[in-house]
Image: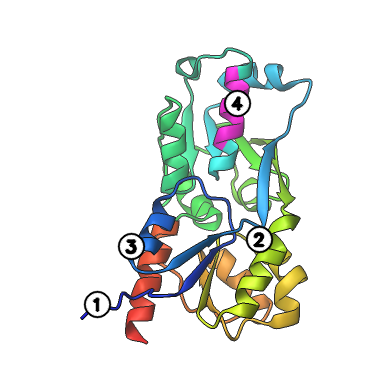
Amino acid sequence: MTKVLPLQDELVIFTGILRSSEAVDMTLQYGGIPVVAPLIATQEIISEDDEQKLLSCQTYDWLIFTSQSSVHAFHAKLMKYHVNPSSINVKIAVVGSKTACAVRSIGLKVHFIPSIFSADVFVKEFPKIATPNEKCLFFKGNLAKKTITDGLVNPIDEWIIYETIEVEENQEQVRSVIENNEKCSIIFTSPSAIEIFHKSIGSQIGYDELTVCAIGHITRDCLESFGATVQVMPDTYTLTEVIHTLVEWKGRE
C-alpha cells in the first residue's frame, strides 16, 4: 500500500519572495503541490549619492540589515562601484538566519542576531551588546516600519535601499487556485503580501477554507486584524520551519 504523505494533494501557496527552492522542495517531499505566486517583489533604489553613502559606511559602528532584500541591494551597489566587501570594517547586526546567510555570502561577518527573528525583539536585545553612543546605519525598504529607528537609543541613520512593489499578474492565479481546490494552505511572510492578498482576494472569499500559515508574530497579528485564523506559525521564523510545522499540523488532522 502506498503511504499517504502529510501534505498529499495539498496545494501550498507561497505568496512571498523566494530566495531558494528549499521550502518548495520540502513541500514536494511531503506530497504537497507547491504554487509559487509571489504577490510582492523588491527592486533596488538607485540614487545619485549612492557612492557617497557607500563610502560613508566606514563612519558607522554598526550596519543593520533586517531582510535579504536589503543585503542584495547593498551588494549590488558594492559591485557597481567596485567596493570590495573586505574593506567594510564595521560590525553588522541582522534580523534572521537567512539575512545572516546573505550577509556572509557576500564576504561580511555577522556580529549580532536576536534570539527571535523580529525587529521588536532586536530592539530589546541589541542594547546588551552595543553601547548607546555607537552609531548605526539601518538599511531598509520603503515600507519598513520605524520599530528599529524609534526603538533604539543609538544615533541611527536610515538608507532606504530597496522598494516593495505589487506583482499583479499573480493575484488571479492565487484566486483561481483557492476557488478551484478544496485543500489549500497559504503562506505569508510579511504584512505587505497580506495587505495585497486581502485587498484583491481575501476580502471577497475569506480565509475560513484555507490553512493559513505565517512567519512571525507581526505577520500573524496582521492576518488576525483582517479576520483570519492562523493555524500554523513556527517558533523559528523561517520558511522551511513553516513547512515543518504545516506537516505536523496536517499530520494531526
Residue at (76, 20) in percent of width and height:
49
Whole-number angstrom distance, CA of label 4 to CA of label 3: 34 Å
Which label lies toward us, 3 or 1? 1
Which is closer to the viewer, label 2 or label 3?
Answer: 3
Q: Quadrant of the rendered structure where residue 47 is? A: top right
Instruction: Report which residue position mark 1 lands on.
Output: 3
Give the Cα separation between the discs numbered 3 and 1: 12 Å
Q: Residue at x 73, y 33 (%)?
A: 45
Tell me if mark 1 has few (under 14), some (14-19) or many (20+) residues whose alpha carbon lies within 10 angstroms of its own.
few
Q: In this view, does 65 lie above or below 216?
A: above
Q: Nearer the viewer, mark 4 or mark 3?
A: 3
Q: Looking at the image, tell me whether mark 2 or mark 3 is earlier in sequence order.
A: 3
Q: How is the image coloured?
A: rainbow
Which circle's residue, 1 or 2, is located before the other in the chain? 1
Mark 2 touches mark 3? (CB < 8 Å): no
**Gap in angstroms between the C-alphas marked 1 and 4:** 46 Å
Viewer-nearest residue: 69 or 66:
69
Amino acid type assigned to the residue bearing label 1 in the image: Lys
Magenta region includes residue 145 = no
| CA distance separating discs 4 and 2 | 24 Å
* Left or right placement of residue 231 versus residue 175 in this view: left
The x, y position of residue 234, in whole percent, is 41, 67
Residue 29 has which mark? 3
Badge 3 amino acid: Gln
Q: What is the number of the mark on residue 76?
A: 4
Q: List the residue tagged with mark 2.
A: 193
Q: What element carries label 3?
A: helix
The N terminus, quarter of image: bottom left
> How many discs appear?
4
**Where are the magenta residues, as a range?**
71-79
